[in-house]
Amino acid sequence: MLSESEQKRLADIEAALQSDTRFVNGFNRALTRRITPRRVISVIIAIAAVVGVIIGLAAGSVPSTVLALCLIGVAGGVWTYRSATTEPQAPQIHPDL
């Protein structure tokens, strides 16, 4: 159980967080995130790459293992890619003379 001072402090923190729209919007986006075709493709690439690494190691083929490891990086890039149009542009700074 929390003491009165701890409960008051927690209420103050909650009130401050509710007024922080950037914080709230971040959680809303995380909760409403859906499965996109790009993410499905990245998971398929990653699974194929892991299978390729296993087969390459079992066969003793260094080039195919390296290629499969590179595909894991490609899958990560596809997963994390964000187009430039979805992010708001940074404010432009115009220095005065």
Image: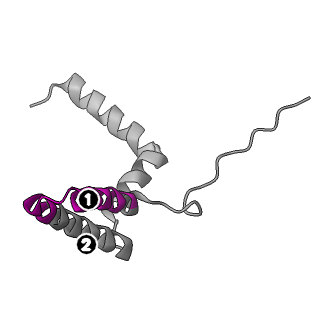
**71 displayed left or right of 2:** right
Q: In the rendering, which numbered label is found on residue 44?
A: 2
Provide residue 90's location: percent of width, then percent of height.
64, 47
Within 10 Å of the Cα at label 1, are there few (<14), some (14-19), or many (20+) other Cα atoms?
Answer: few
Residue 76 versus residue 55 in the image, above or below:
above
Q: Report if residue 86 is visible in the image.
A: yes
Q: Where does residue 34 sit, x and y in percent of width and height? A: 33, 70
Q: How are the colours assigned in the image?
A: one colour
The mark found on residue 26 in the picture is none
Residue plotted at (32% across, 73% down): 41
Q: Secondary structure at mark 2?
A: helix
Query: Which residue is pictured at 12% across the width and 65% down the height?
Result: 55
* Count of labels in the image: 2
SS at mark 1? helix
Q: Badge 2 local density, few (<14 within 10 Å), some, or many (20+)? A: few
Q: Which mark is residue 63?
A: 1
Q: Is residue 79 magenta?
A: no
Report if the CB atoms under discs 1 and 2 are less than 8 Å apart: no
- Whether residue 63 appears in magenta in the rendering, the answer is yes
Image position, residue 27 (x, y; %)? 35, 53
Given the current orientation, which residue lies at the most extreme right position?
97
Q: Residue furthest bottom?
A: 37
The correct choice, above or below, for 60 with respect to 18 in the image is: below
Compare marks 1 and 2 and give the one earlier in the sequence. 2
In this view of the protein, which residue sits in the foreground, 19 or 84?
84
Task: Kindly report which numbered mark, 1 or 2, lies closer to the viewer in this rendering.
Answer: 1
Query: Which amino acid type is shown beneath numbered disc 2?
Result: Ile
Q: Quadrant of residue 39?
A: bottom left
Look at the image and give the residue range highlighted in magenta. 54-77
